Image (cartoon, rainbow, N blue to C red):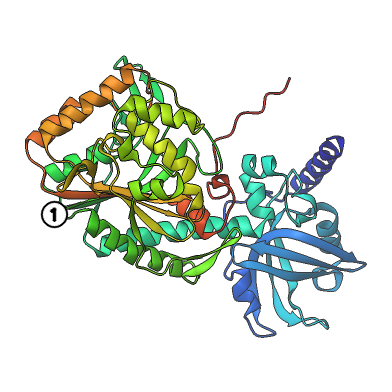
């Protein structure tokens, strides 16, 4: 740490020298005309005016080679006493540091080693930095520092910038896809008087003026379906959601998803849409449909197999959930199977889900639609016509059981939805913190009539994680949730 303070002191001294020379160290405007990549592509003798951050500085007597970097790339600039004059050259050498932003004007030439370079005729300081860049600008490897100081991570690690840009590109591609299919992008409340739309524990806050508790949304579902009741037929939201759950390689308390609702469609239509959308997104980021995720080659060429949750549990967990019709018998079996996170009060739906997560999901490599979930696990989904114990629901899994999306034919029967909500209330009173509360206004909306509708949510963080083969979702969230550092 002492070296860092010495470095800052030195840079502060350089700042004072610059200011005493009458130079503004943080001007509000630049005269840049060319990005560094545009300058690189220019012919020799072309005069260019560029700007960028100094990331390397190599002095050779009366000549100094620097690499400048902007978002387009990096380019060498040659500062020489002959071109700049003795005083101007000396001022640059003594007072400009790695990390400083500088504007340069000069001619393009190619060095004896074949490197395109700007022969600087004029330079101006654009921003004086007071702390050094990561060591040698060759990379920042400390995980804690990378996540806590993402600005340094982006500066030092090209792969981090690549992942951030892929995320932005994917979000734009998703938006373009749904816009082209005549979906309307909408916004729904993040602060809600009642949370719902997913089995999750919410974050609670308090509004002082109204003197009421509010919840950060766990999903936009119930509001989006209100819009279908109101007359929209195709809506989507790229939504920030918040769930008060554990943090691991696949979960962050704050995350982003695309959630959409489609009137006069069912879960079969959702699966067909995903088989159309996903390959387009994969190709948009420059991947083939078959690529390596971790140690496995994963093939995203559609169509994807469609297997019921029951048959997958039979295959991998070696039990038939229909042999355990009662909660008590299933709970006893789950405890024998050493399933974590359950007890004698755990609801039947959660028991099935935990068995599925433990035994099925880790075995999945290539994309597969898991369909027809037990009704206890899906309080907002429509029952299957030919077997009322199951609902018309899908999850797309791949690459070690990563869940890419979740959707279903929406329950639009207000009487049954009310019964399901009441069962969720019972589970909550029994201690299940992830159960949904009873939403009377949503029931009222359904009583006004909602057409047959299908809805789906797809996590953008998880999608980017998979497509970039990142081992932790924190890699693809620019500012992940972290525990503060407490200096004792």
Give the quarter of the image for residue 376.
top left
Give the quarter of the image for residue 329.
top left
Residue at image coords 33%, 23%: 214
Q: Residue pushed farthest left?
A: 448
Residue 279 location (% of width, % of height): 40, 67
Give the quarter of the image for residue 411.
top left
Camera-side residue: 334 or 230? Answer: 334
Quarter containing the N terminus: top right
281 versus 415 height, above or below: below
Residue at image coords 48%, 44%: 359
37 versus 156 height, above or below: below
Residue 244 location (% of width, % of height): 45, 29
455 versus 219 height, above or below: below
Q: Which residue is mark 1?
A: 264
Relative horizontal placement of residue 483, taking residue 309 as reference (left or right)? right
Camera-side residue: 27 or 142? Answer: 142
Residue 37, can we see it? Answer: yes
Relative horizontal placement of residue 145, taking residue 233 as reference (left or right)? right
Residue 360, can we see it? Answer: no
Camera-side residue: 417 or 113? Answer: 417
The local crowd at label 1, few if under 14, some if 14 to 19, many if 20 or more residues have their Cα within 10 Å, is some
Quarter containing the C terminus: top right
Q: Residue pushed farthest front?
A: 323
Residue at image coords 25%, 35%: 379
Residue 256 location (% of width, % of height): 42, 45
Camera-side residue: 380 or 125? Answer: 380
Residue 313 location (% of width, % of height): 40, 46
């Amino acid at each position: 740490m002492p070296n860092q303070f010495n470095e800052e002191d030195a840079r502060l001294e350089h700042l004072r020298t610059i200011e005493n020379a009458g130079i503004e160290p943080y001007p509000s405007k630049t005269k840049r005309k060319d990005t560094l990549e545009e300058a690189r592509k220019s012919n020799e003798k072309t005069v260019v005016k560029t700007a960028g951050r100094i990331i390397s500085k190599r002095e050779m007597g009366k000549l100094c080679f620097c690499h400048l970097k902007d978002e387009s790339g990096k380019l060498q600039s040659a500062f020489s006493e002959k071109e700049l004059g003795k005083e101007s050259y000396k001022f640059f050498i003594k007072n400009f540091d790695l990390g400083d932003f500088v504007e340069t004007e000069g001619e393009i030439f190619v060095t004896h080693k074949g490197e395109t370079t700007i022969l600087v005729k004029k330079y101006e300081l654009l921003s004086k930095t007071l702390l050094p860049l990561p060591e040698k600008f060759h990379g920042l490897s400390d995980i804690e520092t990378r996540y806590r100081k993402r600005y340094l991570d982006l500066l030092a690690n090209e792969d981090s910038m690549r992942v951030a840009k892929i995320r932005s590109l994917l979000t734009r591609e998703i938006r373009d896809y749904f816009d082209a299919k005549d979906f309307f992008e909408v916004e729904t409340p993040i602060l809600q008087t009642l949370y719902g739309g997913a089995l999750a524990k919410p974050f609670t806050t308090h509004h002082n003026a109204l003197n009421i508790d509010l919840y950060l949304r766990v999903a936009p579902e119930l509001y989006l379906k209100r819009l279908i009741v109101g007359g929209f037929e195709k809506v989507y939201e790229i939504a920030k959601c918040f769930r008060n759950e554990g943090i691991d390689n696949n979960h962050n308390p704050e995350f982003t998803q695309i959630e959409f609702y489609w009137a006069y469609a069912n879960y079969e239509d959702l699966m067909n849409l995903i088989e159309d959308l996903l390959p387009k997104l994969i190709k948009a980021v420059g991947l083939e449909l078959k690529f390596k995720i971790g140690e496995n080659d994963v093939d995203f060429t559609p169509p994807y197999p469609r297997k019921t949750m029951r048959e997958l549990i039979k295959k991998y967990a070696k039990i038939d959930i229909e042999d355990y019709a009662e909660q008590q018998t299933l709970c006893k079996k789950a405890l024998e199977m050493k399933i974590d996170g359950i007890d004698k009060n755990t609801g039947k739906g959660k028991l099935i889900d935990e068995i599925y997560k433990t035994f099925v999901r880790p075995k999945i490599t290539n994309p597969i639609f898991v369909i027809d979930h037990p009704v206890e696990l899906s309080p907002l989904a429509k029952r299957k016509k030919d077997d009322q114990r199951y609902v018309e629901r899908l999850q797309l899994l791949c690459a070690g059981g990563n869940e890419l999306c979740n959707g279903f034919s929406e329950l639009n029967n207000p009487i049954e939805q009310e019964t399901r909500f009441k069962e969720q209330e019972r589970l909550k009173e029994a201690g299940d913190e992830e159960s949904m509360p009873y939403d009377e206004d949503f029931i009222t909306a359904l009583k006004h009539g909602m057409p047959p509708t299908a809805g789906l949510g797809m996590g953008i963080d998880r999608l980017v994680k998979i497509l970039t083969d990142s081992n932790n979702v924190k890699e693809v969230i620019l500012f992940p949730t972290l525990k503060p550092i407490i200096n004792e």
